[in-house]
């Protein structure tokens, strides 16, 4: 069974016909959230993992088992996370509960803000700190790749730093070349043990792309720019065309992201309407309607996740005392608001579907 992983705050889907599909996003104190606003750096916050089969009832799977970033990947060798104690350290465990006691691996580069994707039997780890992607077959031994110009990856944090287009067999990322300009970079999946080598595809959308998402099995990549316009690529990120303009109708104040469900595409952002900003498209991203849940405190940023078969969850992170959450069983069209999850934590950025349940990462209050 394919496993889907999603980034919060405009959670992402990473398709993989070869097995597990994974992702994550790092969070650091000071508001620097890869799935939230760009507000500077800081030390990482410890986290708990909680799980739910339907987005309504959550249970604790690990109680501060490890001082982790809220990046989470799931592959053939188990769960993989970076840990706080050393910003260049990776931990792998067969279960969530085992995190904190599992062996560690180390890279010689910083992992302050991280994405991990599992594709074609290997892990691909991207960090804006070194602007490239490291690859590993076992999450223990890593090979660092190259990025044209050695530029940092785009740090507008709603997006994963790298996505995988399973149809075109390409890794796609956005790199920050300075002066508010970004370029799309792409790379083929390398042979085992070889580095990832990106090619610079140049500026797209005036050079202001911020977030990425890929529809599994469809060869469709979407990107959102700073004006909340949607761009589409069907050739592995080589060329892009704008398909929608300001999908939040002038209400959004911070870029979030796009993701894919059963028949609908959803996007989310921080907006100025007093609701979590969630919009839905049923026509391939051309038109979007507001489906924001009513009755949920929108403090902070929305975190979205889906099982790809009609179930969605939405969590609002950075709440004042607990995590506010909503759930949908009809592919994001309507939402129920069960209430607050108050087990000593506020939602961070990662929401992963592991084939049977949602997994979210919470930070202690």
Image: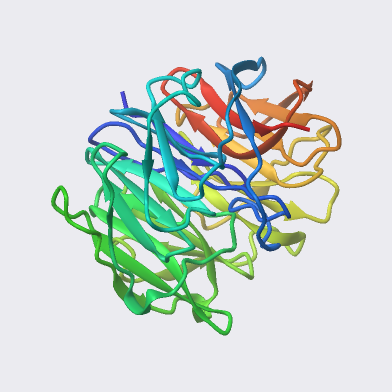
Say whether residue 37 is visible: yes
In the depicted structure, whether residue 31 falls above or below residue 177: above
What residue appears at the point 28 percent right and 28 percent down from the top-left corner? 76
Residue 90 occupies quadrant: top left
Where residue 298 appears, x then y in whole percent?
80, 42
Quadrant into which the C terminus falls: top right
Question: Residue farthest to the bottom?
Answer: 179
Percent coordinates x, y for residue 341 in the rendering? 75, 23
- Asked whether residue 219 is in view, the answer is no
Q: Nearer the viewer, residue 122 or 227?
A: 122
As displayed, is residue 174 above or below residue 329?
below
180 or 215, nearer to the observer: 180
Q: Specify how the rendered protein is coloured.
A: rainbow
Query: In the image, residue 240 lies at what x, y percent?
Result: 39, 70
Q: Is residue 184 above or below residue 44?
A: below
| Residue 239 x %, y % | 34, 71
Q: Quadrant of the N terminus?
A: top left
Residue at the far left: name it: 191
Q: Specify the quadrant of the image occupied by residue 74.
A: top left
* Left or right: 187 in relation to 364: left
Q: How many marks?
A: 0
User: Residue at 81% across / 35% down in the picture?
Assistant: 294
User: Residue at the spot x=55%, y=42% of the render?
Assistant: 85
């Amino acid at each position: 069974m394919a496993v889907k992983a999603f980034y919060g705050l405009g959670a992402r889907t990473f398709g993989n016909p070869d097995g597990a599909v994974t992702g994550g996003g790092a969070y650091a104190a000071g508001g620097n959230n890869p799935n939230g606003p760009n507000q500077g750096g800081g030390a990482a916050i410890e986290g708990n993992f909680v799980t739910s089969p339907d987005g309504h009832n959550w249970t604790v799977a690990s109680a501060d088992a490890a001082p982790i970033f809220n990046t989470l990947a799931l592959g053939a060798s188990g769960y993989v996370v970076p840990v706080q104690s050393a910003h260049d350290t990776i931990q792998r465990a067969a279960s969530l509960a085992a995190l904190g006691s599992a062996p560690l691996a180390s890279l010689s580069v910083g992992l302050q803000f991280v994405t991990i994707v599992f594709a074609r039997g290997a892990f691909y780890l991207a960090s804006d700190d070194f602007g490239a992607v490291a690859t590993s077959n076992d999450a223990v031994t890593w090979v660092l790749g190259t990025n044209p110009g050695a530029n940092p990856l785009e740090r507008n944090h709603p997006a994963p730093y790298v996505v995988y287009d399973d149809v075109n067999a390409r890794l796609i990322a956005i790199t920050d070349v300075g002066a508010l300009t970004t370029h799309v970079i792409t790379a083929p999946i390398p042979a085992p043990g070889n580095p990832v080598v990106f090619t610079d595809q140049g500026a797209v959308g005036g050079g202001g792309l911020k977030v990425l998402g890929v529809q599994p099995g469809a060869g469709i990549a979407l990107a959102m720019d700073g004006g909340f316009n949607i761009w589409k690529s069907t050739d592995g990120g080589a060329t892009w065309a704008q398909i929608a303009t300001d999908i939040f109708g002038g209400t959004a104040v911070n870029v979030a992201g796009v993701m894919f469900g059963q028949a609908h595409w959803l996007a989310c952002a921080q907006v100025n309407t007093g609701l979590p900003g969630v919009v839905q498209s049923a026509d391939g991203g051309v038109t979007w309607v507001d489906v924001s849940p009513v009755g949920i405190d929108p403090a902070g940023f929305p975190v979205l996740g889906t099982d790809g078969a009609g179930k969605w969850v939405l969590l609002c992170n950075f709440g004042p005392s607990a995590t506010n959450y909503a759930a949908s069983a009809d592919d994001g069209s309507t939402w129920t608001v069960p209430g607050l999850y108050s087990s000593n934590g506020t939602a961070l950025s990662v929401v992963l579907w592991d084939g049977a349940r949602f997994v979210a990462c919470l930070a202690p209050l």
